[in-house]
Image (cartoon, coloured by chain):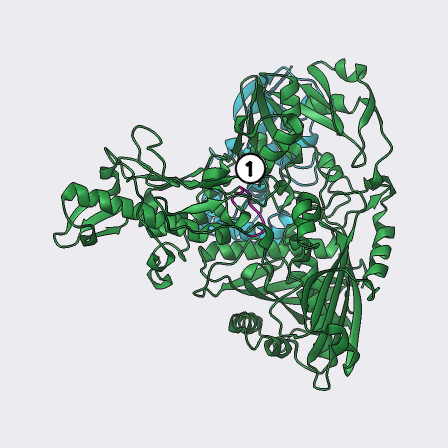
Amino acid sequence: METNKLSRRAFIAGSGSVALGVMLGGWTGARGGASLLLPEAAAADASFSPVAWVSLAPDNTAVIYSPASEMGQGTMTAIPMIVAEEMELDWHKVRVEQAPADPRRFGNPGFGGAMVTGSSRTVKGYYDALRLAGLQARLVLVQAAAGKWGVPAADIRAERSTLIHVPTGRRMAYGDLVDGARVPAELPKVDKSMLKPMSAFAIIGKDLPRVEVPAKSDGSAAFGIDVRLPGMLWAAILHAPVQGEKPLAVVDSAALAVPGVKKVVRLPAGVAVVADSFATARKARDLLEVKWSEEAKARSYDSEAALKEFAARAERLDEAGAVWHKHGDAAQKLSGAARVFRATYTTDHVAHVTMEPMNCTARAEGEAIEIWVPSQSPSGVIGIVAAGAGYKPENIKVHITLLGGGYGRRAEADYSLDAALLAKAMPGVPIQVIWTREDDFQRARPRPMTAQHLVAGIDAEGRIVGWRHRLVSEGIVARTAPAAYQKSGGRDAPVMEGADGVYQIADQLVEHCREQRGVDVSFWRAVGAGYTKFSIETLIDEIAGAAGKDPLQYRLDLTSDTPRAQAVLREAAAMAGWGGSRKPGHALGLAFSDAWSTFIAMVAEVSMSEGRPVVHRLWAAVDCGHAISPANIKAQVEGAALFGLSAALGERLVYKGGQVQQHNLDTYPLLRANQAPVVEVTVLPTDNPPGGMGEVGLPPVAPAVANAVARLTGKRLRNLPFPQTI
Amino acid sequence: MIEFMLNGKQVSADVADDKPLLWVLREDFQLTGTKFGCGMAQCGACTVHFNGQPTRSCVLPAAAVKGASVTTVEGLMRTDAGQALRKAWVAHQVPQCGYCQSGQLMTAAGMLAGADGPLSREQVLEGMAGNLCRCGTYNRIADAVVSVQKSAT
């Protein structure tokens, strides 16, 4: 279960006058240098911030600043709950605001201090820091009350935004301390041993409604595309047909003749039309005549042909790849195995298709630029605008809006550079760039296309004795953080995640072989675990079947030293009635995942219709340790499972000559309401650090369905998406 | 220049005849509840009621709107039916990213208004099949719609 060790440099410092520290570095988009979560001076006249994360008002309400991007995963509720727990805030008096895009104050320790939302790392990354910050804030208030009352701090207890002097029962609201309160020169020293035990949680673990759901239930929620500024213009862009090409000559007279068109601007990889309406800009954009360069490496990329080459390379066992995981001597154990299983798996590119297309609004004034953007990565936006549009990081002000879907696409910041360059070309004028759905496909940053070759050997008792897993694909970290990638010896965490896990197989070799074909691939919900768990979990099922063992029992045997894994396996099986009888023509399939330090088991009930699997129901049991909001965890598993099912059943992005072949939803089918199985989820909280949750429901769904299909048809599915006819 | 009824009020707009209604609403009337998703009537994010019928506004030219009656999610929310849906959406914690939900609400409202009797869960899922949700909230949408029917009877 590799998390990104490269960028994990968070620490808690107990020395000196400041007790909480976060070090920056390791993430390409981040601004470098060390910094500290310093206590804030009172943010406004009438409020008090004992720590940067919270501002108290005299009416006893509290504003908690939510640092991560809200894209439906519930972070805007979960993160403030963590602060409120240790600070003993009355949740009904809490308001949540998006934190300013200031990584020095609000960066994620799990990303080396960068402000990035992704990799299922928000709760995981901020958890300890925010519990400690909440505790510190509470201690500051207790001390202030002790001073005001002239009593020992040890006699004061905090509860629901109220301070209580225990011997006398005297009470004071947090808000009553706001007037005249000061952050002490030396903040109270705190450490993890002072945090509440799980049994004392009053907010964490409660099913609190998500704070932004009401606005999303009446059409009033504002996303990036809904930003409106006085005098704002809109831009549509004719993008280079192939990545890496640039405009050489532009004929724009027809576009400029369209009433409402203000300007045509050449961009590094496109030509933009700015107009007083997006509809006008788009219409005029289609009238541009552009001669493009024809020199990009991507021109030679035909994904269907490349996939065959990837597969052949994956099967070349004597070619050494970059070692992702190695234990014992897999090759030797395989040569002595009683029986050896070999299988090659392929997975196509898939696109994110966030329902809100990429967009960004920017306004430049002199040396400064202000940006409104639905992004998963404020740090990435600052980085790309600084590097690509020539603004100093301190002069770039970023406002993160609600995101109409992220799924990893908005961890990339390419669209924000378009807006910044246009704003720079038209100083003082706010410009909103919108990519059409066709643009969104054309400039897709898809999940890596992969070929995987797995070899597993079993002994006479059916136990796995040796395991090799070779994965061939484009890299992600290799592109986004090349120096770190090189230094690590070719470890590409998102690409390879899920390839190693808790199964007790002593002798293993897991390798990555990198391809470079000129088309960038990127983070797509669950990234690696979406295909590594597919190959692993279907092969495990196949081996269990060949060894005459029950797939559930086989997995329980492989996890005998991981009780948490066994518990979710048993629970999901019980939910589904594993081992019982099913309707004729129906079968169950099981899969397991341990990615992002969270354990999940999923069972799918499937039948076949005209050679296609019909998924009737999914059951999942999940243990992510401390479960911040079980109701929201269920929603995340439901959503991620359907996202993964959609991809497995039919999503496929094909490139020919470097050009994407699918341009809109008519040729890229997504799962619809009448194809959605019911997803039942049981959350099994345990007293462990929280694992990731936003992606966890995805990896087990494709193998669970494939394993059910194998039970029904005898055919093993080894491709994502599944073949159109099985 | 087009004149039409928008959320119960007579309005006019000086726009090109081929400007899609979606952009007229979003740009000329600042009604941003109606969303741009695909631009080719595939996803349903831009659904409005056009003379009472759920309709994709992204492919409906302004010229076709002359004299018609248009209701957006903002208008729906001023009705009892809209409020009932809103409450059910919150109670079931339906939205995730939330971007498609205006369109979901408009389609659900149209479906309920046009239904002869109570719809089954399966009928609701069938009726909502034209509205994509990338976050996978379909089951909660169905539960919310079914609950609205129950509370109405």
Kind of residue sitting beneath label 1: Arg
Quadrant for the N terminus of chain A in the image: bottom right
Residue lying at the far bottom in this picture: please name it.
A460
Please tell me the colour of chain A. green
Q: Nearer the viewer, residue A181 or A363?
A: A181
Please tell me the colour of chain B. cyan
Q: Does residue B17 show up?
A: yes
Left or right of A210 on screen, residue A599? right
Residue lying at the far front in this picture: please name it.
A16
Residue A535, given in percent of the width and then of the height, sits at: 72, 65
Point 37% across, 62% down: residue: A198
Point 29% across, 39% down: residue: A185
User: What span is in magenta?
Assistant: A113-120
Task: Tell me: residue A185, above or below residue A614.
Answer: above
Left or right of A660 on screen, residue A222? left
Point 44% across, 55% down: residue: A628
Q: Secondary structure beneath disc 1? A: loop
Q: Nearer the viewer, residue A581 or B80?
A: A581
Q: Nearer the viewer, residue A335 or A662?
A: A335
Q: Which residue is mark 1?
A: A31
Label 1 crowd (10 A; few <14 / some 14-19 / many >=20): many
Residue B15, given in percent of the width and then of the height, sits at: 65, 17
Label 1 is found on which chain of the structure? A
Quadrant for the C terminus of chain A in the image: bottom right
Q: Does residue B34 show up?
A: no
Q: Quadrant of residue A234?
A: top right
Main SS of the magenta segment?
loop
Q: Nearer the viewer, residue A609 or A473?
A: A473
Residue B81, given in percent of the width and then of the height, sits at: 48, 40
